């Protein structure tokens, strides 16, 4: 079968079976084209909760499918490729977080949404890369234990210097492949071009950027900007997506090494097998875990409205 033929079958089967397909922004464009929604992880889980579909297919990594299940416990949630995990989400164990809570009992535990559901059950409030600053600003406590990404946490801290932060070593191994030297070389090759980076990048990289934001924010900035050339400092699939969406503009990868291999595990073939009912992994979680993890997300949503 040709790609467009597989895509046509996926569209037919998802309509026939009432399946909502979610594609994270780092998925390949052939998967984007069959998805009902494309975006950042938490935004996708909200779209799934609003959908009338009884079955949700997540083309992303495990913690994203777990978040979908937290917000839609009554729905059947399938992870398109069961081997697709997130190294950052798995960096901190439940035992380590428990020990940190004992060490810093007067701190509010703030977890990046990129964490396992087990860590969310021990978390006071979750944040996304786009909402982190606002959420932490609205927390009454001035003592914050931020996990797992110390790079995102440091970026938040710089914008809220009046609060005290505790971090643990951790972060996205993909974004950490981008170095200050990459920025220097990119600016030499493409002078006067805006550098847009994700806050998961190392602190020294973030300091050199013209704009810092989540994946969706980076894409929106590039689309809305009057500038016509951009250096993209996040997962390299975004370069292709922007090239397709904005053919009149030019986009360059900040580092050729910024490739998330876990995201690349999901293929159009995986999606096809899932809608046929012979692939993927169903996310099953007990009611107590779902309820306890939901509290940290509900608190995020409450603080975001203040």
Image (cartoon, grey):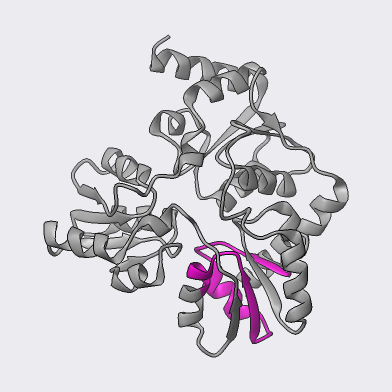
State how many labels appear: 0
Visible in this render: residue 15?
Answer: no
Taking the magenta stretch, the answer to whether it contains residue 151 is yes
Instruction: Residue 233 in the image: state x and y as whole percent.
Output: 33, 56
Q: Please identify the quadrant where the C terminus is shown.
A: bottom right
Q: Quadrant of residue 98?
A: bottom right
Q: Is residue 213 above or below residue 204?
A: above
Instruction: Residue 111 in the image: state x and y as whole percent.
Output: 64, 65
Instruction: Residue 136 in the image: state x and y as whole percent.
Output: 59, 76
Q: Is residue 23 left or right of residue 50?
A: left
The residue stretch that appears in magenta:
124-153
Q: Please identify the quadrant where the N terminus is shown.
A: top left
Q: Quadrant of residue 131?
A: bottom right
Residue at far bottom of view: 162
Q: Is residue 251 left or right of residue 69?
A: left
Q: Residue at left 43%, top 65%?
A: 199
Q: Residue at left 34%, top 41%?
A: 241
Q: Is residue 111 above or below residue 20?
A: below
Q: Is residue 94 above or below residue 266?
A: below
Residue at far top of view: 1
């Amino acid at each position: 079968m040709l790609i467009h033929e597989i895509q046509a079958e996926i569209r037919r089967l998802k309509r026939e079976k009432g399946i909502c397909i979610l594609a994270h922004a780092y998925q390949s464009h052939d998967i984007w084209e069959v998805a009902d929604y494309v975006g950042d992880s938490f935004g996708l889980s909200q779209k799934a909760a609003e959908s009338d579909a009884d079955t949700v297919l997540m083309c992303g990594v495990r913690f994203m499918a777990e978040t979908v299940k937290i917000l839609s416990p009554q729905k059947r949630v399938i992870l398109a490729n069961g081997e697709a995990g997130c190294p950052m989400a798995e960096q901190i164990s439940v035992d380590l977080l428990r020990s940190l809570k004992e060490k810093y009992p007067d701190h509010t535990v703030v977890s990046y949404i990129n964490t396992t559901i087990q860590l969310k059950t021990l978390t006071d409030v979750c944040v996304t890369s786009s909402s982190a600053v606002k959420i932490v600003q609205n927390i009454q406590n001035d003592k914050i234990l931020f996990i797992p990404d110390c790079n995102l946490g440091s970026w938040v801290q710089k914008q809220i210097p009046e609060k005290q932060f505790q971090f643990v070593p951790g972060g996205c191994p993909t974004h950490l492949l981008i170095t200050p030297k990459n920025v220097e070389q990119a600016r030499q090759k493409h002078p006067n071009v805006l550098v847009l980076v994700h806050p998961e990048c190392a602190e020294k990289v973030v300091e050199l950027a013209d704009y810092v934001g989540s994946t969706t924010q980076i894409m929106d900035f590039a689309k809305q900007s009057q500038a016509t050339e951009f250096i993209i400092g996040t997962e390299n699939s975004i370069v292709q997506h922007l090239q397709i969406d904005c053919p009149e503009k030019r986009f360059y990868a900040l580092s050729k090494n910024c490739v998330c291999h876990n995201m690349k595990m999901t293929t159009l073939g995986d999606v096809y097998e899932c809608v046929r009912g012979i692939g993927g992994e169903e996310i099953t979680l007990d009611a107590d875990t779902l309820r306890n993890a939901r509290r940290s997300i509900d608190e995020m949503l409450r603080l975001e409205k203040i």
